[in-house]
């Protein structure tokens, strides 16, 4: 059981900074969510961690050793992404064979069960499959390789609702059977909220949240009521977003509320979900 | 059996509340086994750590007990314990909000008492 550490990671393309000074760590046996708006650099980050791209600065270590100096480190992590890295005419079954040779082990029995559950023909060529079925074939590979860290970049791309449900269930099943670390990068925040225990939010080159989901949501609020009373209650709070319909105002904050502060009768304070919290945290334009 | 989750409280708390309700209504009888963390996690698509946290709330309240190697079971006095707990909360959860709403509607104390009595009579004629 080892920890993957990302230390002061920076990525620039020319004069453009994509990721700036990110530090965080991935512990054994967690299901992490990596969230960010389009273009926030989620895929770039995952590619760098998996050695498919290079950082401008910073270091990634596994059990204390830099992954660039430890060839075996990359065998302990797997990245499933949109990129198609397979030669033409690769069949689903070939994909499994390649994974089996590249990693410590591959659970072929599970792969067979999953292709039958998802109704994927193992003899089919990848480039003849629909977007959804291609995603499924890649997902099955990711769930069956024996690694300590499984990175899933857009794991539900093109999947219908039934297949997404099946995927969530199979993910939790394999997680129970063989506890390891999963990192899900997705825009379907409401669907993954109950699956993930910890969330990373990337925004404007920075990691703006690195927190247990329960803790983040415990301090994420919608405060609504007559505008004047809401303003009075919210004095001094950092208002992330707000909307007003005639005289009714709703204000969103993500911070602990002072329990001593008196709540006016007509003001209602409610919890918000992860998707809403994400939206209000990442709404602002860059300065 | 039906679990449903909203944003009113953390998922582990809602899971604990709903399991408690299922024990209270007798869906899981005293001494009976409840679904395992694994089952609940996979069926409800909830992180197993979250499910465990919810179950442990009920273990702390002595409504559930772990039997080594077998799983999680409803304790023999679970229903009684839930009754006690709910009686304690009855005033705060029901009476206070009833009076609040009645006040907003301009219903007097006497009228409210009459309404409660009528509710009981109605209940009897229904039987």
Image (tube, coloured by chain):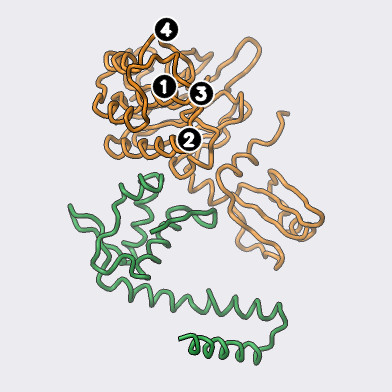
Chain colours: A orange, B green
- Residue bearing mark 2: A33
Circle 4 crowding by C-alpha within 10 Å: few under 14, some 14–19, many from 20: few
The mark that comes first in sequence, 3 or 2, is 3
Marks 3 and 2: which is nearer the front?
2
Q: Can marks 3 and 1 be said to lie on one chain?
A: yes
Q: Position of residue B32 (x, y in %)?
A: 24, 64
**Disc 4 to disc 2, C-alpha distance:** 32 Å
Marked residue chain, label 3: A
- Quadrant for residue A229, please give it: bottom right
Circle 1 crowding by C-alpha within 10 Å: few under 14, some 14–19, many from 20: many
Q: Can marks 4 and 1 be said to lie on one chain?
A: yes
In this view of the protein, which residue sits in the foreground, A236 or A108?
A: A108
Q: Is there CB contact under 8 Å for labels 4 and 2? A: no
Marks 3 and 1: which is nearer the front?
1
Q: Is there CB contact under 8 Å for labels 3 and 4? A: no
Classify residue A179 as left or right of residue A8: left
Q: Can marks 3 and 2 be said to lie on one chain?
A: yes
Classify residue A95 as left or right of residue A287: left
The mark that comes first in sequence, 4 or 1, is 1
- Residue bearing mark 4: A88
In this view of the protein, which residue sits in the foreground, B116 or A3?
A: B116
**Disc 3 to disc 2, C-alpha distance:** 20 Å
In this view of the protein, which residue sits in the foreground, A215 or B92?
A: B92
- Residue bearing mark 3: A8
Q: Can marks 4 and 2 be said to lie on one chain?
A: yes
- Label 1: state its secondary structure: strand
The mark that comes first in sequence, 3 or 4, is 3
**Disc 1 to disc 2, C-alpha distance:** 14 Å
- Label 4: state its secondary structure: loop
- Label 3: state its secondary structure: strand
| B95 in relation to A152, above or below | below
């Amino acid at each position: 059981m080892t920890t993957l550490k990302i230390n002061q990671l920076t990525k620039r393309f020319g004069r453009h900074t994509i990721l700036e000074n990110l530090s965080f760590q991935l512990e054994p046996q967690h299901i992490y969510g990596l969230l960010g708006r389009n273009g926030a650099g989620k895929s770039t980050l995952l590619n760098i961690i998996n050695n498919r791209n290079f950082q401008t600065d910073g270091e990634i270590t596994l059990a204390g050793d830099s992954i660039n100096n430890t060839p075996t480190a990359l065998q302990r992590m797997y990245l499933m992404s949109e990129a198609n890295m397979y030669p033409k005419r690769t069949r689903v079954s070939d994909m499994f064979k390649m994974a089996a040779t590249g990693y410590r082990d591959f659970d072929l029995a599970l792969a067979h069960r999953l292709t039958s559950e998802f109704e994927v023909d193992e003899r089919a060529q990848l480039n003849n499959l629909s977007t959804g079925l291609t995603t499924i074939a890649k997902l099955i590979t990711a769930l069956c390789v024996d690694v300590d860290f499984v990175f899933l970049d857009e794991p539900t791309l093109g999947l219908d609702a039934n297949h997404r449900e099946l995927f969530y269930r199979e993910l939790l099943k394999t997680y129970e059977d063989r506890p390891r670390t999963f990192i899900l990068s997705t825009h379907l925040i409401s669907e993954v909220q109950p699956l993930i225990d910890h969330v990373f939010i990337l925004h404007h080159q920075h990691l703006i949240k690195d927190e247990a989901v329960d803790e983040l949501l415990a301090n994420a609020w919608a405060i609504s009521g007559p505008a004047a009373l809401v303003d009075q209650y919210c004095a001094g709070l950092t208002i992330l977003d707000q909307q007003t319909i005639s005289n009714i105002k709703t204000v969103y904050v993500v911070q602990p509320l002072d329990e001593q502060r008196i709540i006016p009768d007509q003001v209602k304070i409610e919890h918000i979900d992860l998707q809403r919290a994400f939206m209000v945290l990442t709404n602002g334009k860059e300065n | 059996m039906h679990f449903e989750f909203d944003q009113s409280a953390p998922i582990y708390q809602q899971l604990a509340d709903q399991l408690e309700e299922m024990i209270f209504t007798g869906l899981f009888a005293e001494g009976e086994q409840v679904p395992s963390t694994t089952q609940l996690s996979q069926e409800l698509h909830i992180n197993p750590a979250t499910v465990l946290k919810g179950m442990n709330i009920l273990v702390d309240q002595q409504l559930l007990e772990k039997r080594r190697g077998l799983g999680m079971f409803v304790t023999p006095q679970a229903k009684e314990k839930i009754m006690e707990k709910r009686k304690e909360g009855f005033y705060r959860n029901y009476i206070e909000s009833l009076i609040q709403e009645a006040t907003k509607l301009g219903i007097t104390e006497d009228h409210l008492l009459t309404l409660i009595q009528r509710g009981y009579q109605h209940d009897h004629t229904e039987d």
